[in-house]
Amino acid sequence: MSTEPDPGATGPSQDGWRHLHPLSPLLKGGIAFLAVLAYVVSQQADALFGANRDDPTQGHLGLAAVGVVVVLLAIIAGAWVSWRFSRFRVAETLIELRTGVLFRQHRQVRFDRIQAVDLGRPLLARLTGLSEVVVQSAGGKDSHLKLAFLTDAQAQQVREQLMALAGRSDEATGSGLSDADFADLPAPGPVGDRVLAVPNARILQSVLYSGPGLAIVVAVPALVLSVALGVPEMVAWLGPMTLAIGSAHLKRLTQECNFELVHQGDRLRIRHGLTDLRTTTVPLHRIQAIEVSQSLPWRLTGWWRIKVNVAGAGTGAGDAETQTVLMPVGHREEALRVLALVHPGIPRDAALAALEGQGPGEGFVTSTTRARHLDPLSWRRQGYAVLPDGLLTRRGAWYRAAQFVPHARIQSLKVEQGPVQRRRGVATVRIVSTVGPVSPAVAHLDEPDATRLLNEQVVRSGRARQRV
């Protein structure tokens, strides 16, 4: 018997295939509608204020309006047809999504390849009470599966179901899900313990209290003054620079607003976003490395930032970024609380020494005076400490950073030595983790210390992987 879903059916088929929400094509076509609306409003702005303007329609305004309506109807009709041929189901060992009319696509993600299941709520979806489910797989961003859109309650049920199935992927899970199955799905998991809630005012201040942020504070008044005084040379120089820096910081601001970190047993749940509200689940066992950092302007406020490498998250912006930031900005005690949650085996005194200390205290092996000329500001801070559960490193005087990598998560190590380092008798050891924003390294160690770290850490990592 064929398992192809009937595109004309409205309910689920007997083998569990389901449609997405009927408003999905309107949400997808709504972006095009807003773009056309914005264009029309901009063209009519001069007329609204009584100014003369050129008529781009050459007197055929009625025909232009009809053309706009036809284009919008075509977009919505195409999206509706696409929705009718888009279905998904949760099968015995995988989740499947079928899309397309002329060019059909069948995407599958096995439960044992699921890295995380996230919820996204763009602005238009939030207004209609819908959410999208993003199933992140080990194959990277191109292999992710996105269900856009479901009702918020249904999306949460699907996420909890998939996370439960991913946790026991080797077991049989039964047949696909029908309407009755959805009614029997487990309710969303417990709310959990809220570890961190960052006020939006602090997010805004953190963006301004940075090198580029301070540049914007100075550049914007200068740009306004240049426009007022009629200095085109300054406008041509300041305008693009302010736009480039400002757009990047505006994106960060909209992504990190409403930030909340919740601990739910073996996972962390990250909720953040201003116009696009996202909820990301990060399993604790997939965190490969963690970094706590502090820029020079943040020294005045005592703020820190926490980033992590997550297996399967990769690098870059977008979905990966939602998993690699555990704390966009927070005080030292908040940073220590998150650090202890992710890796409870780090003693508090060792963590404080990694964040703010220098010299050989708390078991740290540091650079010697031979590295003074290579790194005059932070040679006393450069170093590492071996803990029972992992390797703790630190660096930087103006930009402080401390990293922790569990022994079993270290992929490899390498020793680097340039010609100047050879003359000084020092070397740099790089700890290779999975792909991500955290790149631990210990610079300018004495050659014997660098060689000893390399040889001993290979043994420690091998033993730790055997115990996992």
Image (spheres, grey):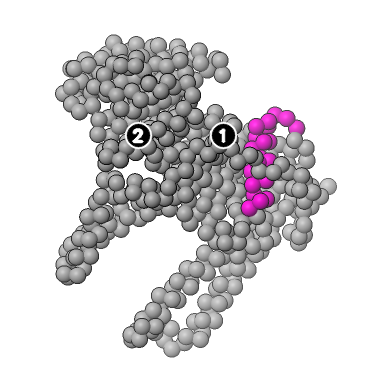
Q: On the picture, is 217 further left or further right than 184?
A: left
Instruction: Give the residue drawn at x 36%, y 51%.
Output: 204
Q: Amino acid at mark 1?
A: Arg
Query: Which labelled disc corresponds to residue 293?
Result: 2
Report the span colored magenta: 152-172
Is residue 431 covered in magenta?
Answer: no
Query: Which labelled disc corresponds to residue 267?
Result: 1
Instruction: Give the residue drawn at x 43%, y 53%.
Output: 254
Q: On the picture, is 156 further left or further right than 122?
A: right
Residue 337 on image: x %, y %: 45, 31
Is residue 168 covered in magenta?
Answer: yes
> Is 91 in front, or is 204?
204
Q: Name the secondary structure under disc 1.
A: strand
Pointer 1: residues within 10 angstroms few (<14), some, or many (20+)?
some
- Residue 438 showing in the rendered view: no
Name the quadrant of the C terminus: top right
Task: Compare marks 1 and 2 and give the one earlier in the sequence.
Answer: 1
> Is 254 in front, or is 301?
301
- Residue 310 showing in the rendered view: yes
Q: Is residue 316 above or below residue 228?
A: above
Residue 145 on image: x %, y %: 60, 46
Q: Amino acid at mark 2?
A: Ser
Query: Alpha-carbon distance for marks 1 and 2?
Result: 23 Å
